[in-house]
Image (tube, rainbow, N blue to C red):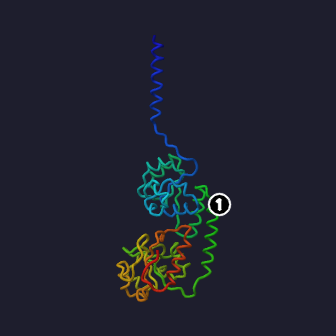
Amino acid sequence: MRLNIFRVLLLISVPLALAGCAKTTVIKHRTGPRIVSTDPSATQILLQIGAGKTIVGVSPWDKPLLPKSMGDLPVVGGYLHLDEELVVRLAPTALILQQAPERVEPGVLAMARQNGIRIVNIKINTFHQLFAVVRTLGGISGCQKPAAAAIHTLQSELKILATHRPKNPPRVVYIISTRPIRVVGADNFMDQEITLAGGNNVAQRCGDGFPAITRGTLVRLNPQILLISKPGQPAASGPEDPRLKPWLTLPLAAARAKRVDLITWPQAQMLTLHVGRMIDRLRKLIYAPASAGGVQ
């Protein structure tokens, strides 16, 4: 009798167990590279080498720059506030950061290690670093050949631009933020862009990177062309635009000649494979007639 009762209980429990299993949601992800990017430059480069389908999560800064077809991609946060639980659910093969190695949160490293996620921490401040990053992104996305071809094309383009330097380039200062005033200094990709566009970046003497300066220093630099970065904003409406008026009143050659311009292109402060387009826009602006306006 006991044996029969055991068999009955077993027959009852097995279907119940199977029913319980049926309620469990199993998330199935496609095979192949799956990339979460918290760096907009890296995201754009992935798109530019044809690796858009490998992107499964992005940062909030990426959203305005993505094509409409990718507008529903999950936002995992940025490197300072990363949603680790969401990252794990997305099951990426690689997580892209752009952060000093010593500043990467130990929790992020542990999360990646426990879930078999490769941390790809990029540095992309110069053209040379751009080429290295493109190779890395080509490798993790399975798009090595398109990446190599894109590097070759861009290197040839930059080489041609370098041979067309004017003899007396105009003095340029490029402001990337106004409170405090930060300018494009030496040894960075925006400095390289100004040079290849035919300008003389006189703010190089203020230091490397993006140093903060005073209005007095700006007056002493006395640029002939003053560029003010306002990525994603509307173009200037003219000299009366409130974003231009404070600069047009300064004792600068650029103000007297009405060569104060806004740079409103959304990717103006990003280094990607489209850097040639940015250089071309800067060249047209530097050598365009006075406008006291802006370029989109």
Q: In the picture shown, does residue 166 fall above or below 229?
A: below
Residue at image point 48% right, 72% down:
209
Q: Secondary structure at mark 1?
A: helix
Q: Position of residue 277 (x, y in %)?
A: 54, 73
The residue that appears at 64% across and 68% down in the rendered structure is 152
| Disc 1 packing (10 Å; few <14; some 14–19; many ≥20) | few
Residue found at the very far top of the displayed protein:
1
Picture residue at 61% right of the left edge, 62% below the top: 147
Which sits in the foreground, 267 or 85?
Answer: 267
Taking 197 as reference, is 105 left or right?
Answer: left
Quarter of the rendering containing residue 264: bottom left
Q: Residue furthest front?
A: 69
Picture coordinates of residue 11, whole percent (x, y): 48, 21
- Image spot of residue 219 (x, y percent): 40, 85
Q: Residue at x 50, y 74 (%)?
A: 190
- Along the line of sight, which residue is nearer the eye, 126 or 89? 89
Residue 122, placed above or below residue 109: below
Choose between 101 and 156: the one closer to the eye: 156
Residue 21 percent coordinates (x, y)? 47, 33
**Residue that numbered label 1 is attached to:** 145
On the image, which quarter does residue 249 sit in? bottom left
The residue nearer to you, when weighing 230 against 184, is 230
The three-letter code of the residue at mark 1 reads Lys
Number of marks? 1
